Amino acid sequence: MSKMPAKDTAAKADKNRIPDGRGPAKSVMKATLKTELQILSEIGRISNSSASLTEKLQQTVEAVARGMGKEGASVFLLDRSGATVTLAAAIGLNQETIGKLSFPLGMGIAGWVAEQKVPLALEDPFSDPRFQYVPETGIERFKSLSAAPIMDESRCLGVIFVLSATPWNASASDITLLTTTANQISGVIQNARLLDDLQGRLSELGTIYDIGMALTSTLDFEELLALIAKNATQALQAKGCAIRLLNLPVTRASGFAASYSLIDDTVKEVDATIGEAIARKTAEDKKPLLIRDLSLDTSFENTAALTPTSIISVPLIFHNKVNGIITLYNKESGQPFYEDDLQFLSTIASGAAVALENAAMYERMEELATDTRTRAEKLSILYDIGNAMSTTLDLDKLLRIILTAATMGSGLA
């Protein structure tokens, strides 16, 4: 059998190939799709596990680096205020920087991607003006990177990076793969946070129940103030709590009367300087007040020299009347207070306002009962004197009866 000429063989081979060079492109596309499916399948498995969000993110960056054939990967998460991105998980970078490395929104590559909400590929990131070198991370081990925002519709949750130890000019398909992966990671974050929120809500409800039981355990006013301050401080892990009273009968004063304080030394000066002004504003507005960072708030004077402070303040309202203000200072964690902290304190304050009103009324009733007993005793003495006077006309005997009755017990004083 004669052999086909080489030219004909090449021509026949060409018939089996997609024209215009699309054969190799199709092969690359299939490989990319296979890699994408493998990564997404792995992330789906991680998402359905019972691990914590931190563990899930760590497993995810390992799966992404492995799936894309690169030596490193990391995830930065945007904080609840939307002002800072912080390293939450990483492979290839120094592990001790996880949870510590942060960039303000718009700063560094992570901050820029989070702010602009667009993917980015840099073959030489060290020469890019947006890059901020932090030697503690060990980033010098890598030559190139690509990054994509982790989006929840129009809201950015964080940024995922893939890091290459060799020069890497990421292709459009690489960026598409990373963006698709980022979308999958968004689901991991949202599901984990939803679970955390549900568990947190259950914990809050348990705490509110415990506080409610404690507040109904006593009608002693001073003991009740101590319970409110202690439970609010512990529940929200604050460094200080001050309760200033207003309008309650037990205060016997106009304006803010003697309060109860459970203040750490680190915030004692803050409360002494601005505590009453905070309480006055809260009382006047009749609504909760949240100050994430006092140094950035221009509503109050004389705050420049104070240490960084986060404050939440809530009115104690009973029948539309402000009876006092409860104010918390600084979280033990160093994080600022947020809206959910303010809402939680407002829930505590609602029960506390009723409990304080009941305790004040009970104290007032005891005072009235004591006054009534005193009046009854005096009327009884007067009755005895009148009765004795009607039974004798002997002046000496009559005087002795009057003196005896007048000096018995508390007498007529």
Image (cartoon, helix red, strand yellow):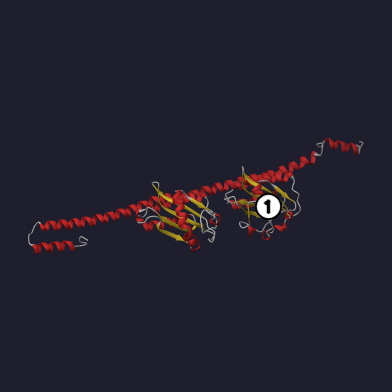
Residue at the extreme left: 393
> Which amino acid type corresponds to the residue marked 1 in the rendered image?
Ile
Front in this rendered view, residue 217 or 355 = 355
Residue 400 quadrant: bottom left
Q: Position of residue 133 (x, y in %)?
A: 69, 58
Mark 1: secondary structure: helix
Q: Position of residue 379 (x, y in %)?
A: 19, 55
Side of 410 relative to 35 (left or right)? left
Residue drawn at point x = 76 percent, y = 53 percent: 167
Front in this rendered view, residue 36 or 169 = 169
The mark tally for this picture is 1
Task: Residue 67: tell me if it is visible.
Answer: yes
State which quarter of the image contains the C terminus: bottom left
Q: Residues within 10 Å of mark 1 (few under 14, many from 20)?
A: many
Q: Position of residue 28 (x, y in %)?
A: 76, 43
Task: Residue 61: tell me if it is visible.
Answer: no
Front in this rendered view, residue 126 or 49 = 126
Side of 133 relative to 246 (left or right)? right
State which quarter of the image contains the N terminus: top right
Residue drawn at point x = 72 percent, y = 58 percent: 141
Front in this rendered view, residue 67 or 22 = 22
Residue drawn at point x = 56 percent, y = 55 percent: 296
Q: Position of residue 203 (x, y in %)?
A: 48, 51
Look at mark 1 in the image and give the residue it sits on: 109
